[in-house]
Amino acid sequence: MDTDLPSGAVPATSALMSTEPQKAPDAKSAADPKAMKPYVRLAATLVMTGAGIFGLERFGLGEVKTFFGGRIDPTILSILVIVPMVMIIGGGLVFLIGRMRRL
């Protein structure tokens, strides 16, 4: 058999034709949310919620401005910007602190 492989290299097809039985998928796979650690779940929830609120705020800000005649109370505007950022930063901190405690 002529191949252009260096000496000692195994063709990629030999791994596919292995006679070893394949493992069945584990019940706790990475896609299973119950397999995630609690601090990772909390951090992911905080970050995703913060990002979602931020996205809704950016999308809806133009609509709200037209509804209120172009003026929004600066307090409400700052809350709409600060709360998602605090949630995202909080999610990062929860992940870092949870990760350090597990080490």
Image (spheres, grey):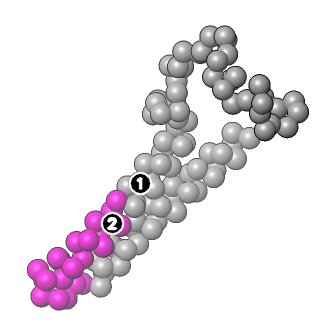
What type of secondary structure mainly makes up the magenta span?
Answer: helix
Measured as percent of width and height from the top left, residue 89 is found at 52, 63
Horizontal relation, residue 68 to residue 43: left or right: left
Q: Name the residue tied to disc 2.
A: 55
The C terminus - image quarter:
top right
Measured as percent of width and height from the top left, residue 19 is found at 66, 10
Measured as percent of width and height from the top left, residue 34 is found at 47, 29
Q: Given the current orientation, which residue lies at the most extreme bottom position?
A: 70
Q: Which residues are magenta?
A: 52-73
Label 2 residue SS: helix
70 falls in the magenta region: yes
- Give me the residue at 28% from left, 65% from top: 56
Residue 48 bears which disc, if any? 1
Label 1 residue SS: helix
**Label 1 packing within 10 angstroms: few (<14), some (14-19), many (20+):** some
In the displayed structure, 79 sits above or below 5; it is below
Q: Nearer the viewer, residue 32 or 44?
A: 32
Measured as percent of width and height from the top left, residue 23 is found at 59, 15
Q: Give whichever of discs 2 and 1 has the lower sequence position.
A: 1
In the displayed structure, 42 sits above or below 58; it is above
- Give me the residue at 37% from left, 55% from top: 49
Distance between the Cα atoms at labels 2 and 1? 10 Å
12 falls in the magenta region: no
Location of residue 9 by image quarter: top right
Location of residue 80 by image quarter: bottom left
Q: Nearer the viewer, residue 49 or 19?
A: 19
Horizontal relation, residue 14 to residue 32: left or right: right
